[in-house]
Image (cartoon, grey):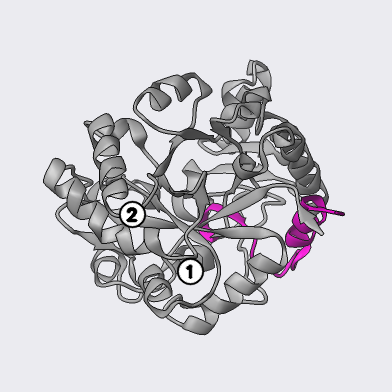
Amino acid sequence: MGIKARVIAFYLPQFHPIKENDEWWGKGFTEWTNVGKAKPLFRGHYQPRVPADLGYYDLRVPEVRAAQAAMAEEYGVEGFCYWHYWFGHGKRLLERPFEEVLRSGKPEFPFCLGWANETWSGIWHGQSNKLLIEQRYFGILDYEAHFYDVLDAFKDSRYICVDSKPLFYIYKPMLLPDATAFIELWQNLAIKNGLKGIYFVGYCPRFEDKNDILKLGFDAVNLSRLFDVERLNTNRIQRGITHRIFKKLRVFDYEKAFKYFVGDEEKDISCIPTIYPNWDNSPRSKERGYIFVNSTPKLFKRHVKQVLDIVKDKPSENRVLFLKSWNEWAEGNYMEPDLIYGKEYLEVLKEELTTEK
């Protein structure tokens, strides 16, 4: 059996308490807090979402991390892209799950890092003016310290590489005040430390920004077309009805939306597409939510097939797909089993990825 593409699933580490979240949101807060208190906002709205096989887990528990990796591997996911938080001057948050994976050597499942270089505020919790922690950039010395902070991960045999270079994902490439200098420094430090370089991938929510990101020194962009269904929908009457009925909510039918999730542009070797099982961030944002309704494993199967067809002619090494996400429960995009569909989304992913040799 062979695999048609390299699927890397984004992995959220916010399923364990930290003192900062205790201070901001109350003792014991984790992502499950938002998930568990979610309520349906309209007729037919699938909320709350309840985890099945893995339950309401705590990522400090090694057995949980092992079970996640085993499940992902069984259904064709190559590895996890752990969200990594570096706010400058060595300030990190939510690092414990990945650090334990790195130091223990378990699970033996591939990984890479995605730098979520973004200021945290209370906007998704109804407190838009509440600054929690600011993303800051302190220049060359701090960039060098950041590199050496992740060097052990880059050198780990499990680290996901493209063209023999560790893949490092940056969520907000245009926010880096001197992205070219940052990338040049890390490339030089990588070679100095025995690596062949770094394969930099930048998040790109608008295809129009692709060339601007690549010019900064990135090897590829990850095109995320999640919101194109609204941006490209020229039916103003339909949009108006949707907004009047749901007020501030943005609600779209998944079957109509997924055709916007990928385009011919992703045939380019420097463009990595994204696959989405679903999206519903109303547990975090309440009435400001962006929601797809009526997603099913059958429709997800069609979406996966569509994306695989776009990338089929790329070299196998570069036939990368980002899966958003493995466990973003409060955004309604997850592959872990829930009480409604169980493992059905995983099963159709495996069916589409697997090919006879």
Q: Which range is magenta? A: 328-357
Q: The residue under label 2 is which amino acid type?
A: Gly
Q: 269 or 205: which is nearer to us?
A: 269
> Pointer 2: residues within 10 angstroms few (<14), some, or many (20+)?
few
Asked whether, in this view, residue 68 is left or right of residue 349, the answer is left
Q: Against 24, is 105 above or below? A: below
Q: How many marks?
A: 2
Q: Against 232, is 125 above or below? A: below
> Pointer 1: residues within 10 angstroms few (<14), some, or many (20+)?
many
What residue sits 48% from the left and 69% below the top?
32
Give residue 139's quadrant in the image. Answer: top left
Q: Is residue 143 shown in magenta?
A: no
Q: Which residue is mark 1?
A: 32
Q: Is residue 339 shown in magenta?
A: yes
SS at mark 1? helix
Mark closer to the observer (1, 2): 2
SS at mark 2? loop
Q: Which mark is residue 194?
A: 2
Q: 273 or 166: which is nearer to us?
A: 166
Give the distance between the C-alpha atoms of the residues marked 1 and 2, in whole angstroms: 41 Å
Q: Against 73, is 132 above or below? A: above
Percent position of residue 252, x then y: 66, 36
Direction right: furthest residue: 356
Asked whether, in this view, residue 343 is left or right of residue 142, the answer is right
Q: 333 or 127: which is nearer to us?
A: 333
The C terminus, quarter of image: bottom right
Q: The residue under label 1 is which amino acid type?
A: Trp
Can residue 275 be seen by looking at this rendering?
A: no
Percent position of residue 141, x then y: 12, 47
Q: Which mark is residue 172?
A: none
What residue sits 53% from the left and 63% below the top?
110
> Which of the marked residues, 1 or 2, is nearer the chain's N terminus?
1
